[in-house]
Image: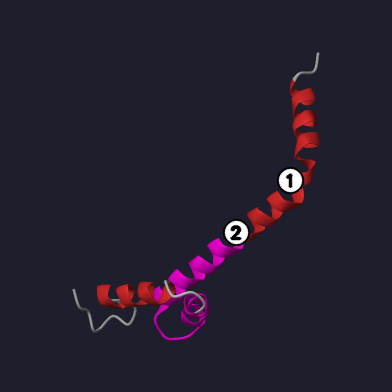
Amino acid sequence: MNNDDDSNYVSVWSWMWMLFILAIPGLGAAMIFVWAFTGENQTRKNYFRAIIAWILVGTVLIIGLIVLAPHMPALQKYIHDWRHKP
């Protein structure tokens, strides 16, 4: 389906090209930001903005686990004691 009237239309070949570029280390990471904030195509911009949002969510979760890791035995003991109150 080729719809030249729709400015948000992205062809399969365009998606394939973008995915190929994303597979190249360094260049792919930079292009995520380029495609998220430049151009007229809202579909492409929203897709790459969603990728950035997922990267941020993952980063926050990983940092949270790193910060909590030293306290895990204490947290597990606290939860165990709380759940097994007499």
Residue at x 44%, y 75% (from the top left corner): 24
Q: Residue at x 46, y 80 (%)?
A: 35
Q: Residue at x 36, y 74 (%)?
A: 20
Q: Foreground residue, 80 or 43?
A: 80
The numbered dot on residue 57 is: 2
Give the camera-side residue of 67 and 24.
24
The label nearer to you, 2 versus 1, is: 1
Residue at the (59%, 58%) spot, across then down: 58
Task: Work out how far the residue at label 2 is from the one at label 1, CA to CA, in angstroms.
Answer: 18 Å
User: Magenta-highlighted stretch: main secondary structure?
Assistant: helix
Check if residue 25 falls in the magenta segment.
no
- Give the mark nearest the N terminus, 2 or 1: 2
Place residue 47 in its image quadrant.
bottom left
SS at badge 2: helix
Magenta segment boundaries in residue numbering: 27-56
Quadrant for residue 17, please give it.
Answer: bottom left
